[in-house]
Image (cartoon, rainbow, N blue to C red):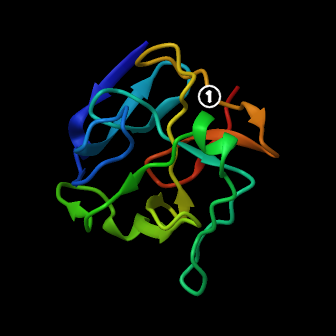
Amino acid sequence: MLHARKILAAIVFAGALSPALAQNVALIVSNDDKYGPHLTDEAGRSFYMFSADQQGTESAPAVSNCKDACAEAWPPLTISDPLDITGRIDKNLIGQIERTDGSTQVTFGGWPLYYYARHEGVGRLSGQLVEEFGGIWYLVAPDGAAIKKK
């Protein structure tokens, strides 16, 4: 069962994510009985990281390796305006990269963030540990780490 906690009601992104998603997104922490705390948007849609991506560091930006059919199945969290960050969250974990299509993707803990298009409804964590497009997809913990629970 999913329990939303707005303790870290943190980031409001102004700009379009995709035609099917809301224009403004808040990054919050939700809690699941099985997986524990993880990042979601205000509607309870979970964010994922992709093991085939390159994690960003202070000296090198993150690299998204999810394009074309991958990006259709796993839509990246993109923004068109600068981030508007508020609330209690480690702002050092939030970043952005330019995708090969020129859009700007949000990163957290150095990892590009994605939704899972095939979710079976809000609160369903059906993308956890999915193996496809050359990597494994993980829920994102509030500290920016991958949640690797089955």
Q: Position of residue 18 (x, y in %)?
A: 39, 42
The relative height of residue 140 versus residue 45 in the rendered view (above or below) is below
Q: Is residue 56 left or right of residue 104?
A: right
- Toward the right, the furthest residue is 134
The relative height of residue 3 versus residue 97 in the rendered view (above or below) is above
SS at circle 1: loop
Residue on which the image places disc 1: 127
Q: Look at label 1 and name its amino acid.
A: Gly
The quadrant of the picture occupied by the C terminus is top right
Depth check: give the residue in front, 40 or 34.
40
Q: Is residue 132 left or right of residue 149?
A: right
Which residue is rendered at x = 58% and y = 77% of the image?
Answer: 57
Which residue is rendered at x = 71% and y = 32% of the image?
Answer: 129
Which residue is rendered at x = 57% and y = 52% of the image?
Answer: 145
Depth check: give the residue in front, 2 or 12.
12
Q: Position of residue 32 (x, y in %)?
A: 46, 23
Q: Hey, which quadrant is residue 62 in on the image?
A: bottom right
